Image (cartoon, grey):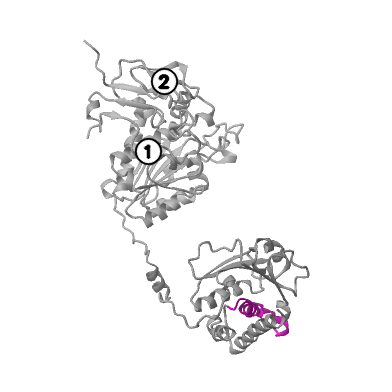
Amino acid sequence: MTEAKYPRSEVNLDKCKGCGLCIAACPMHVLVESPKLNSKGYHYAEYTGSGCVGCGNCFYSCPEPDAITVYLKNYNPNEEV
Amino acid sequence: MKKTVLRKPKGFNDVYRHKPGAEKDRTHYCPGCGHGILHKLIAEAMEDLDIVDETILISPVGCSVFAYYYFNTGNFQAAHGRAPAIATATSRANPDKVVISYQGDGDLAAIGGNNILQAANRGENIAVFFVNNAIYGMTGGQMAPTTLPGQVTTTTPYGRNVDTDGYPMKVCEVLSQLTAPTYIERVSLHDAPHIRKARTAVRKALKNAKERKGFQLVEVLSSCPSGWKMDPVKSMEWVKEKMVPLYPLGVYKDLGEDARITVRPVPVMDPAAVWEKLGISAEKDVDFPRGDVPDEYRKMSIRVAGFGGQGIMVTGQALASVALEYGYNVSWLPSYGPEMRGGTANCSVNIQDGIIGAAEAVKPSMLLAMNRPSLEKFEEFVVPGGTLIYNSTLIDTEPTRTDIKVFALPITGMADELGNIRVQSLVNIGAYAAITGMFRVEDVITLLPKLFKGKKQAIIDLNARAVKAGFNYVKENF
């Protein structure tokens, strides 16, 4: 059985400023600071790949408009306009 | 409709095209800045309430000065502390728009303290988002009215001392005492549950604003990791541990169902209606046919300058008033110190057929210098080919410009010979008429009783002699 694709948190790594607020806000501890640097020189946040419950805490804690997208459980990419 | 994805809200611009530099896809805010969080809540609420296209956002001075890069709304940027005044005007002039005023604590609670107080007291139809991070963030972390007692800032290196610096300004508590405000709440951004509460408050304020339910204010306790010299996560802990106890969260005022929908008279935008109110005929009433005016004098931008008491303002008013009778568009803009006599004074007059833009004669086509300081101050600004008239009675130096026409007239002397130096302004009008050909002397004399309503006939006659003297001097000597 494959793990459900959604919910899922996705970090736009080049827009992340590495502030860490999403990591602190994640109740499931599935966001971590990457050991790698992005093009701006920040250790960006990244999703470990499993365990997201789609609560949206990371999205609302993130000060950058376009650095985090959260696809909720009922997300269907085919329905996107 | 239930959301299936949380992504950059439509309240933001897709691309921040007004932002200078190459990075037009991200904000200028520091990592962990609370402004970004609040921006996102506002942008999301605007999208969900479907008000993005009917919102005008006023940005303040402070880090959020550049809010206009980001929000996909109409935008104004206000001078320091004046966002509520600009928001008031915007809201009154656009009663069908949602007006947001976004301010920081240095901006709102210090220099703009009275602005916010009066806007709240008038119950303006605006939603104010007030970011309180306890310092002046943008300028480098100085003490603000909201700085905590004992808090070390760049201007309180030993900590804020309440005996010398006063106590933290509690804006929600103060404003909630007023009758007019509809909704006032304080929220915090220090963790996810509190961001949710802030989100609810932002939505409520904007929903009320959409329904024109008067004055809304949400104070948002926020962090400034750079100004506080803390990492973003620690600074949120600092908000929780230090700020929240001092600035209690919660609803301070909510009229709820009692909130009134405020309807104000729509401003009159019809020039003819304004003229009628002012008692001016909208039809141009031209009593005096124009004479031959050389091209160079058909679009006049005039600076009249001298000592206070030399008739500077009267000269300007009379030039404008007479020109008006010939059907020109005119403006008169005074500039003077507090003294009625002495001191220096100047005014700008524009006379032309087209629409007058700026009223100030920054680069005048004519300078009328009544004393030496005025000549020295304004001579360099006269446009090449322009005209300089100077008062040779009081100015014993020669003008330095050689690319302009110069008329040296003993204006004060002529007025003195007529028996009253207060008629200098009428000498000026006569000289202007002779130089430009714009006015006929007999027309000006006909107009004198109208220009100087209530003056005795003897004064009117003296004024008429002064006009003729100025006119004749130019005709005889140039």
Q: CA distance from mark 2 to mark 1?
A: 23 Å
Q: Going by the picture, which residue comes out furthest to the right?
A: B396
Q: Position of residue B376 (x, y in %)?
A: 72, 63
Q: Is residue B431 magenta?
A: yes
Count the labels in the image.
2
Q: Chain letter of disc 2?
A: A
Residue B164 visible (yes or no): yes
Q: Position of residue B362 (x, y in %)?
A: 60, 61
Q: Which element is circle 2 on?
A: strand
Q: Is residue A4 magenta?
A: no
Residues behind callouts 2 and 1 on a single chain: no
Residue A75 visible (yes or no): no
Q: Which element is circle 1 on?
A: loop
**Residue B451: which disc?**
none
Can you say whether B201 is above or below A44 in the image?
A: below
Q: Chain letter of disc 1?
A: B
Please give the name of the residue rendered at 42% of the width and 51% of the height, measured from the top-left corner.
B87
**Residue B409 figure quarter:** bottom right
> Split into 4 quadrants, where in the image is the C terminus of chain B?
bottom right
What residue is shown with label 2?
A45
What residue is shown with label 1?
B12
Direction from residue B131 to residue B394 in the image, left or right: right
Write the start and end of the magenta stretch as one range: B414-437
| Residue type pointed to by label 1 | Phe
> Split into 4 quadrants, where in the image is the N terminus of chain B?
top left
Please give the name of the residue rendered at 50% of the width and 74% of the height, measured from the top-left corner.
B328
Q: Position of residue B330 (x, y in %)?
A: 52, 71
